[in-house]
Amino acid sequence: MTIGLLAPLYPWVKALHVMSVIAWMAGMFYLPRLFVYHCDLVPGSAESERFKVMERRLFKQIINPAMMAAWSFGILLVLTPGVIDWGAGWWHVKLAAVLLLSGFHGELSRWRRAFLEDRNRRPARFYRIANEVPTVLMVVIVLMVIARPF
């Protein structure tokens, strides 16, 4: 199903989608790094409390709105005539990667809550490794959209 009225808006919707994705990814790259540094702090200390504020602001004011905008503009792109060849396979892989990225977003929320409640039990190494997840998913997404290999 497509909506013909979206066709003339395509370049604008695409631009807004790309900007939203950039903001979302920036936050997804940065928040796990904050967790890495937060792990080394004494729970309840002034420094730990400062990280809680930074993490909350990043998540609530940047990551969440950017994700909602990226999804909204992405759905509008899908509904624009001629944007997707529904017989191609690339969009299935892209959609799967975006769903995984959204799931990772949910995990970040859970981990942030654990830090907020001073109950994080994971080491900094865990968050260093987790920090690579959005990068891998971003590579897959960009390759699917730009190269459309299948």
Image (cartoon, rainbow, N blue to C red):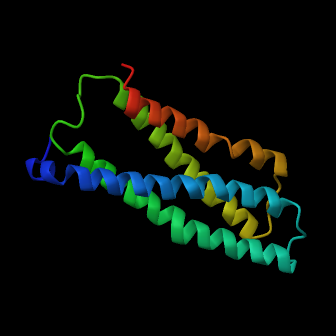
Residue ID at (50%, 59%):
23
Q: x and y percent of residue 26 in the render?
A: 57, 56
Residue 68 drawn above or below residue 11: below
- Could you tell me how many numbered marks the image carries? 0
Residue 130 drawn above or below residue 96: below
Nearer to the camera, 56 or 106: 56
Farthest bottom residue in view? 46
User: Based on the displayed image, in which of its 4 quarters is residue 82 positioned?
Assistant: top left
Q: x and y percent of residue 16 in the render?
A: 34, 57
Q: Quadrant of the N terminus?
A: top left
Residue ID at (72%, 70%):
116
Q: x and y percent of residue 127 in the render?
A: 75, 49
Q: Quadrant of the C terminus?
A: top left
Residue 79 drawn above or below residue 85: below
Farthest top residue in view? 150
Residue ID at (33%, 54%):
15
Q: x and y percent of residue 39 in the render?
A: 84, 60
